[in-house]
Image (cartoon, rainbow, N blue to C red):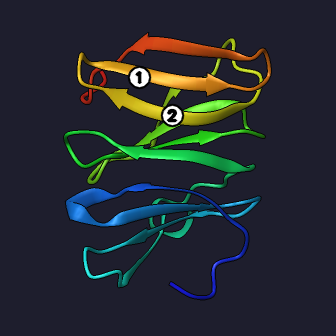
Amino acid sequence: MLGLEGPCWVGPGPDGGLAVSEEFGDVWLFGSACQPLGSLGVLKGHAFGNPAGVCTDVEGSVIVADEQGRRVTLFPRAREPVCLVSEGLGRPLGVACAPQGQLVVADAGDGCIKVYQYHSEPA
């Protein structure tokens, strides 16, 4: 996986691949054989501020914490991106899906770990 500009975070991607965020760049998806699949910015027409933490939910949707944009966004496979959390975030750096249906966000803005109820199919 050469040619990335400032890789910051790496996490599991859809279908056994990887999702890699670039500082002040984009989020790149790689397949299970580490082949590049494209970037979320191009594939979904989304502009990131500073994508940081990345994770993938049980449905295979990628979730990205955008530090500069102060939001956490869900990127479903077949739908448009959905903002999951924006209020109350200072500098969201890390994100994880907990097995109890929760979204966990590390917010460096106030030094807190924030837990939100999460459903992979937003209403």
Mark 1 and mark 2 residues within 8 Å of each other at the beta carbon: yes
- Residue holding disc 1: 103
Q: Amino acid at mark 1?
A: Leu
Packing grade of label 1 (10 A; few <14, some 14-19, many >=20) is many
Q: Give the percent coordinates (x, y) of residue 60.
A: 24, 49
Q: Is residue 1 above or below residue 103?
A: below
Residue at 75%, 49% (x, y): give it.
49
Residue 26 position within the rendered picture, expressed as x and y whole percent measured from the top left: 62, 63
Q: Which residue is mark 2?
A: 95
**Horizontal arrangement in the rendering, residue 91 relative to residue 98 (left or right):** right
Residue 57: x, y in percent?
Answer: 29, 39
Instruction: Check disc 1 and report its element: helix, strand or loop.
Output: strand
Q: Residue at x 73, y 59 (%)?
A: 23
State the residue in front, 62 or 98: 98
Question: What residue is rendered at 54% in x and 25% in y?
Answer: 105
Q: Is residue 52 above or below residue 8?
A: above
Position of residue 39 relative to residue 95, above or below, is below
Q: Is residue 34 left or right of residue 90?
A: left
Q: Quadrant of residue 103?
A: top left
Secondary structure beneath label 2: strand
Q: If the image is split into quadrants, where does the C terminus sit? A: top left
Is 86 drawn above or below residue 30 in the view shown?
above
On the picture, is 62 further left or further right than 67?
left
Q: Residues under labels 1 and 2: Cα distance?
A: 7 Å
Q: Label 2: few (<14), some or many (≥20) within 10 Å?
A: many
User: For the point 51% across and 37% down, which residue is it?
Assistant: 73
Considering depth in this image, is 10 or 116 the residue closer to the camera?
Answer: 10
| Residue 95 pos. (x, y %) | 51, 34
In the picture, residue 15 is in which quadrant?
bottom left
